[in-house]
Amino acid sequence: MKWIVGLGNPGTTYQSTRHNVGFMVIDELARRWNIQVTQSKCKALIGEGNVQGTKVVLIKPMTYMNLSGESVRSFMDYFKADLEDGLIVYDDMDTEVGKVRLRYQGSAGGHNGIKSLIQHLGTQQFNRIRMGVSRPQPGRNIADYVLDNFPKSEQEALKSMIEQACDAVEYSLKASFDNTMAKFNK
């Protein structure tokens, strides 16, 4: 079983914000794979399906970003899921809008959702796709920035980045994460 978690915040208020690119990727994968992500379980919305002969679970934590680790831990315990079969998708200010970076370890880098995951998983080693949202202008409040919608000028880059991330997730279903990183980290 492979499981993919998109980090974000629940509710329509946050739907199109920078902090919700993880949810956007889950929504696009659900559309591509015809999986309904509507089952309420483990403090998350979950959808299960079969993709290329692999059982896949799509997960959108409903705990709000800062408590994402609670939901992921609950999912892993309930489903007896292995950490190495998981993939976390989230926004990253150190990556430019339109770019994706795949990594298998690292610190939270100030990202509270990742901080919560590290705390609840007890490790910094888990597969991840970092979605670029760029840094705000100096002096701009970071919380306000990540909870802002993407401007019109970034819509094309956003669409392309979501496609790239979904392609990487699909590729990772059949390839090792090392091979997936080699292919998608340009």
Image (cartoon, grey):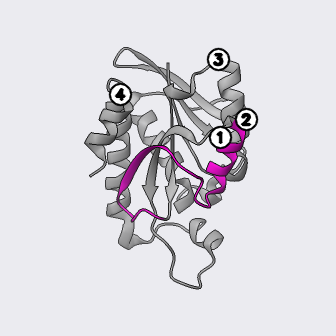
Q: Alpha-carbon distance for marks 3 and 2? A: 16 Å
* Badge 2 element: loop
> Which is more N-terminal, label 2 or label 1?
2
Under mark 4, the amino acid is: Ser
Tell me the residue that label 4 is attached to: 176
Pinpoint residue 157: horizontal percent, then vertical percent. Answer: 33, 62
* Image marks 1 and 4: residues in contact by CB distance under 8 Å: no
Most extreme residue toward the top is 53
Q: Residue at x 60, y 50 (%)?
A: 8
Residue 42 falls in image quadrant: top right
The reply, left or right, for residue 126 in relation to residue 141 is: left
Pinpoint residue 38: horizontal percent, then vertical percent. Answer: 61, 31
Under mark 1, the amino acid is: Pro
Tell me the residue that label 3 is attached to: 80
Q: Which residues are magenta?
A: 94-120
Q: In this view of the protein, can residue 151 be seen by the observer?
A: yes
Q: Which is more toward the observer, 40 or 122?
A: 122
Pinpoint residue 113: horizontal percent, then vertical percent. Answer: 64, 51
Tell me the residue that label 2 is attached to: 43
The reply, left or right, for residue 130 in relation to residue 71 is: left
Most extreme residue toward the bottom is 139
Q: Alpha-carbon distance for marks 3 and 1? A: 17 Å
> Which is more N-terminal, label 1 or label 3?
1
Tell me the residue that label 1 is attached to: 61
